[in-house]
Amino acid sequence: IEAFGPVPEVIPLHLLYRPANNIPYATIEKDLNGQFAKYSMEDKSRNLSASEIGQKCHTFQHWIYQWTNGNLLITDLQGVGLMLTDVQIVTSSKGYQGLRGNCASSVIEEFAA
């Protein structure tokens, strides 16, 4: 959609292997400078962002939910400006096309209510 404007982007998370350390794995991501905002959270009562970015995040969240017939939901959309970090994936209790989410499936039920 031409008039949609810039779109939010989930920044990549990189996994490092450090065999000499007691905890050999670590994750790193780009440092986000600026005002951190939460646009779309698991708890719907915390979805307070009426900003353009917040509305785009909510639109994406609803589109994913509809596209997958209510079996998949992206939540915890947060970050700085258009750069999002630490998003969470929720699947229905049976999963979705082999994917299992990292949040309780009850989040989907709460989203749909």
Image (spheres, rainbow, N blue to C red):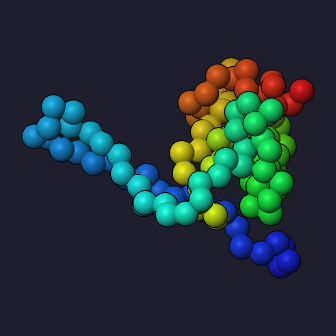
Q: Residue furthest right?
A: 113
- Kindly tell me whether residue 67 is visible in this rendering: no
Expressed as whole percent of the image width and height from the top left, the position of residue 56 reads 78, 59
Q: Residue furthest front?
A: 35
Front residue of 102/99: it is: 102
Expressed as whole percent of the image width and height from the top left, the position of residue 110 reads 81, 25
Q: Residue furthest bottom?
A: 2
- Quadrant where the image shows the N terminus: bottom right
At a point 47% along the width and 57% down the height, the residue shown is 12
In the displayed structure, 10 sits above or below 96; it is: below
Q: Quadrant of residue 7?
A: bottom right
Looking at the image, residue 26 sits to the left or right of residue 31; the answer is left
- Kindly tell me whether residue 87 is visible in this rendering: yes
Front residue of 30/104: it is: 30
In the displayed structure, 92 sits above or below 34; it is: above
Q: Quadrant of residue 73?
A: top right
